[in-house]
Amino acid sequence: MGNKFFESPFFKKISRIADFFLGSLYFLICSIPVLTLFPALCALYYTMAKAVRYGSGKSTTGSFFLGFRQNLKQGLWLSVLCALGIVILYTMYDVARGVGFGTLYGRIYLILIPVYTIVFAAMLITVVPIVSRFSIKTLAAFKLALSFIRRHPWKILTYVIALAGSAALSFAFPPLSLVLPGGYMFSLTYLMEPMLLEYMREHPEETGEVPSWLEDALEESRREN
C-alpha cells in the first residue's frame, strides 16, 4: 500500500513541486551576488534536466550544486556579458526618453528596444542549456544558440513570452518566485532537449563522452530519427 502511494500520480506531482521549490530556492540564493546569476541559471537547468526530467537518481540538491560548480568559472564571465546586455537595453531606453518618445529617433528606439529585448531573451534561454550541457567555449556557445534560434524561431519566441509572463507573475505575487524558476526551467527542457540531443547525435566528436544519465535519452532520440 505504501509503495503504491509513493508511485501514485498524486505523489509524483507533489514530489515534482518540491523539486521546483528546492531548485528555485537554491537559484535565488546563489543569484544574490549577481555575478553568479549565470552559473545559477545553468545549475537550475542542469538540475531540472538531470534530476527531474530524466530521473537520474541524483538528488535535486546534489545536482544543483554540482552544476553550479561545473559552470562557475565560465558562468562568471557570462554574467558580466548579461549585465552588459542589460546596461545596453537601459541605455537605449534612456536615449529614447532623452530625445523624446514622440520624436523620430525616439520612435525608432521604441521599435528597437522590444526587438533587442526579444533577441537578448532568446539568446539567454538557449545559451544557458548549451553551457550547462557541453564543455564549450563562449563564442561557440553563442554561435550554436544562434543556429538553434534560426531553426526554431517560433518555438523559442513562445518561451520568451513565457519567460516574460513568469517574471510578471513573480513580481505581482512574490511567493511564486519560490517555484516558478524551477517550473520554467523544467518546461524549457521540452524545448531544448530535442535540440541538444540532435546536436549530440550529429557532432559526437565535439560533445565528448555522453553522461550515463543521458544515454537512454540519446538512444531513444537515435531510434526516433
Image (tube, rainbow, N blue to C red):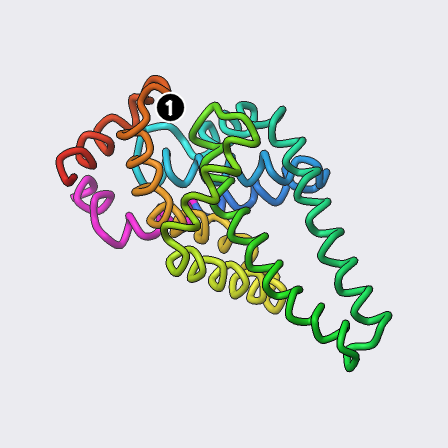
Residue 209 in percent (x, y) is at 33, 17
- 2 to the left or right of 14: left
| Viewer-closest of 167 and 15 | 167
Tell me if residue 3 is in the magenta stretch: yes
The residue singled out by tag 1 in the image is 207
Q: Amino acid at mark 1?
A: Thr
Residue 198 in percent (x, y) is at 29, 36
- 188 to the left or right of 29: left
| Viewer-closest of 17 and 116 | 116
What are the residue bounds of the magenta stretch? Answer: 1-19
**Residue placed farthest to the bottom in the image?**
102
**Residue placed farthest to the left in the image?**
223
Q: Residue at x 71, y 68 (%)?
A: 109
Residue 201 in percent (x, y) is at 26, 29
Looking at the image, residue 166 lies above or below residue 80: below
Q: Residue at x 57, y 42 (%)?
A: 27
Q: Residue at x 47, y 32 (%)?
A: 132
